[in-house]
Amino acid sequence: MSTVVYPGSFNPITFGHANIVERGLKLFDHVVVAIGTSADKDPDIELHDRIELCREALKEFGSRVSVEGFNTLLVEFVREHGTTFVLRGLRTVTDYDYEFQMLEMNQALDPSIEYVLLPTSNEWSHVSSTRVREIASFGGDVSAFVAPCVVDYYR
Ligand code: ADP
């Protein structure tokens, strides 16, 4: 069975993330969504809640998707799951620069690691967790960008 690890903050999970998972499943049998904490991002949703929201938002994919929190090196987490593949989405040139930096650092730590970078579909290219948090903090309607469970979370 082929497995890929899709790491991120998922703070919160959006339809953009779900689209990457759905397309990742065309390439791999199993996607492990790995939720970490990112030092430079405002972790305003507790890890436990981010995990629960991801599980609920991705439940349509059944047992082919699992969701876990992690606080180790990504390369270790990937190895522990018996794979060398990491899935990430690309929205913009800024994403590309950031991803390349991460990719090179992780390949320096473990040369067997391979990144699979999927370009975002047009429909979701403007969607980011940061914008969702911003809109939600002003009481705006985020239902066009996130699953109903995330909308409920902000109510
Ligand atoms: P991180 O804090 O590691 O950037 P995110 O949760 O913000 O984690 O994003 C995880 C991954 O999902 C990243 O590769 C990011 O580029 C990708 N991603 C986020 N939003 C979208 C989107 N709307 N379309 C495609 N990919 C996305």
Image (cartoon, rainbow, N blue to C red):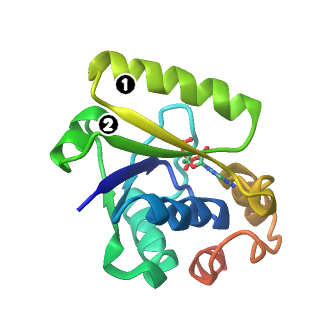
In the picture of the structure, the residue carrying the numbered disc 1 is: 106
Residue 138 in view of the camera: yes
Residue depicted at 48% across the width and 65% down the height:
26
Residue type beneath disc 2: Leu
Position of 9 with respect to 109 (left or right) is right
Going by the numbered disc 1, the residue's amino acid type is Asn
Q: Is residue 90 left or right of residue 113?
A: right
Q: Residue at x 80, y 63 (%)?
A: 123
x and y percent of residue 77 in the render?
24, 42
Q: Based on the displayed image, in which of its 4 quarters is residue 61 positioned?
A: bottom left
Query: 71 and 123: which one is in front?
Result: 123
Q: Are marks 2 and 1 in contact (CB under 8 Å)?
A: yes
Spatial CA span between label 2 and label 1:
8 Å
Q: Is residue 75 left or right of residue 47?
A: left
The answer to whether the residue bearing label 2 lies less than 8 angstroms from the nearest atom of ligand 1 is no
Image spot of residue 78 (x, y percent): 26, 42
Q: Earlier in the sequence, mark 2 or mark 1?
A: 2
Which circle marks residue 52 in the picture? none
For the residue pair 149 and 58, the one nearer the viewer reads as: 58
Task: In this rendered view, identify the residue nearer to me: 145 or 4.
Answer: 4
- Mark 2, residue position: 74
Residue 73 visible in rendering: no
| Residue in front for this viewpoint, 154 or 142 | 142
Vertical order, 11 against 62 (above or below):
above
Numbered disc 1: secondary structure: helix
